[in-house]
Image (tube, rainbow, N blue to C red):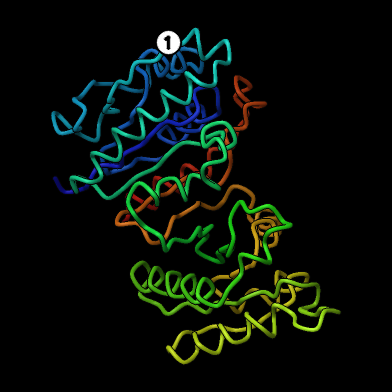
Amino acid sequence: MKFKPILIVAGQPKSIFFEIFFKSIRKKKIKSPIIIISSLKLLTSEMKRLNFKKKIKLQNIDSLGRNKINNTNINLINVNLNYSKVKNINMKYTNSYLYNCFDIAFKILKTGYTDKFINGPINKTSFLNKKFLGITEFISKKFNVKNNAMLIYNKNLSVCPLTTHQPIKTVSNKINKKKILQKIVLINNFYLKLNKIKPKIAVTGLNPHCESILKNSEEKKIIIPSLKAAKKLGLSVYGPFSADTIFQRENCRNFNVILGMYHDQVLGPFKTKFEYDAINVTLGLPFFRVTPDHGPNEKMYKKNKSNPQSIINALEFLDKN
C-alpha cells in the first residue's frame, strides 16, 4: 500500500464531527485510505441528515482494518451503538461506546499497520471522569508514554502549553526545569523530523511582565535556568517573554513556536489569531496523533454551520506525512 491509512475514531456521537468530516472530504481529495471507527447506524443517520449519502461510498471492513482497503470509499469498522440511549443523553453508555472505539484503534496502532490517527472531539469532562487532564494524557497512558506535549500547530506559528488542562491555582506547582526542557526537546525533534529545520522557540514567563513581588519568582528560579540548559544542548530558545506582548506581530514573527506556562496563556491569543486554521498534535507518541483544534461543540450540533478547516488541516497533515 503506497499510503498508510488514516485511522479515525469519530468521537462524541452528538457533536459536530460528522458535519465537518463530510465537508472536509467533499472539499479535499485525500490520497491516503480512510478507516473510520464508528457506529454504522450513527454514521448513515448523519449522512442522511446532512444530505451527504449520495456523495460518499461506504464499505464495512473487519476490526483489524486490513481487508479491501482503498481510498475511493470510507472504510468503516462498525461498533455497536444503541442510538436511543445516546439521544436520551445516557453519558455512561456513550462513554462505554467511545472506549470501545478507542480500544479498537489502539489495537490497530500497536500492530504498526498505520501510524496516522485522528480522534474526533470528545467531551473530556464526562469521558475522562477526572482520571486524566485530557485526551492527550489518556492516550499517552495507553502507550506508556510519560513525556508528551500538546502542540497546536500552524505552519506559520505554533504554540505549546507546558501544562495542559491544569486548574489555574495548581499551575505554579506543576512548573519545573525538567518539564520545560522535555517540552523544548520534543518540539525541536518534531520540527527537525517534519520540516528539517531547527525551530526558534520563544518561552513565556508565568507572572505578569515576568515579574513577581515574591522573593523568588518562577522566572528566576525555574524558567531562566531551564532556558540556559536548553541552550547548552544547542537548542534555539529565547525568553522568558511577557505573555501580554509576545503575540504582537513584530514579536512573534521571529519564532516558529511559543511555549507558554499554561493552556489559555497561549491558546487564547493563538485562536484569536488563527481561529480554525490549526491542528492539535500530540508529541512523544510512537505515531502521529492529530485532532481538530476544537471541542465537540454540542450547541452547534444539527445546525450545519460549523467550520471544517481544522479537520481539513488534520487530514492534509497526515496525508503528507
Characterize the local packing of mark 1: few (<14), some (14-19) or many (20 or more) Cα atoms within 10 angstroms.
few
Q: Nearer the viewer, residue 19 or 39?
A: 39
What amino acid is at disc 1? Asn
SS type, badge 1: loop
Residue at (63, 80) in percent of width and height: 223
- Work out whether 184 lies above or below 56: below
Residue at (35, 40) in percent of width and height: 29
- Work out whether 213 lies above or below 96: below
Q: Quadrant of the C terminus?
A: bottom left
Residue at (58, 15) in percent of width and height: 89
Extreme residue in the bottom direction: 232
User: Toward which corner of the image does residue 301 lie, by quadrant?
Assistant: top right
Q: Position of residue 316 (x, y in %)?
A: 39, 49
Q: Quadrant of the N terminus?
A: top left
Residue where numbered disc 1 is placed: 82
Residue at (74, 80) in percent of width and height: 217
Image check: 56 left or right of 152? Answer: left
Q: Position of residue 298 (x, y in %)?
A: 62, 27
